[in-house]
Amino acid sequence: MGRQVKCPYCERKLDKDESYEYKKRYYHVECFEEWNQEKTHREELLSYVCNLYKMDAPTGMMLKQIKDFQTDYKYKLKGMELALRYFHDTLGNSVVEGAGIGIIPFVYEDAKKHYIQLSKVEESVENTTPKKTRVVEVQSPTFNYTSKIHKIDITSL
């Protein structure tokens, strides 16, 4: 049994030999993967917000809103990004300068339903088997038009 270290993500102790070292800190492998994924999602959200509002970095108010949504509503970072994408890209709403990202709580559940539906559609498309095409030749019917046309003698009129 090796030296005990504390995982900075979950704050539980683990053996140093069984840990994943990153920047002189020791993580559980699962904790590091979760932390790394959260870091990636945060970068994607901040990048989208900066592109959306045409700024270099998000404002302090936006960062506080993100933190509040995480703590108060238990929203995920990827969910917040998808909610903004749904509101602006899918629904086509314009960006209001100085408004921040306060729209997220109002559209989060609708965006969630939308992306779940998209996921189900993509899954059903992947699970379908292509149907075999069958070539059927149909001969066009032949009619004898001369037998059906009654000739009228114009001289008798």
Image: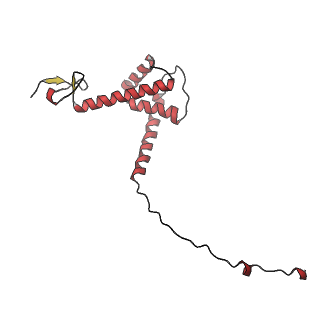
Measuring from the top left, give residue 17's x and y in whole percent: 14, 29
Q: Is 127 left or right of 35, judged from the image as shown?
A: right
- Which quarter shows the N terminus? top left
- Which quarter shows the C terminus? bottom right
| Residue located farthest toward the left when viewing the structure as drawn | 1
Q: Residue at x 24, y 33 (%)?
A: 30
Count of numbered circles in the view: 0
- The chosen color scheme is secondary structure
Is residue 30 visible to us here? yes
117 and 34: which is toward the camera: 34
Measuring from the top left, give residue 73's x and y in whole percent: 39, 27
Is residue 75 visible to us here? no
- From this view, report whether residue 134 is shown above or below residue 2: below
- From this view, report whether residue 156 is shown above or below residue 119: below
Q: Is 96 left or right of 47, judged from the image as shown?
A: right
Measuring from the top left, give residue 129's x and y in whole percent: 40, 57
Measuring from the top left, give residue 83's x and y in whole percent: 45, 32
Q: Is 12 left or right of 49, judged from the image as shown?
A: left
Q: Residue at x 44, y 39 (%)?
A: 115
- From this view, report whether residue 19 is shown above or below residue 60: below
When asked about the image quadrant of residue 108, the answer is top left
112 and 72: which is toward the camera: 112
Q: Residue at x 42, y 30 (%)?
A: 80
When asked about the image quadrant of residue 149, the answer is bottom right
Q: Residue at x 23, y 32 (%)?
A: 29
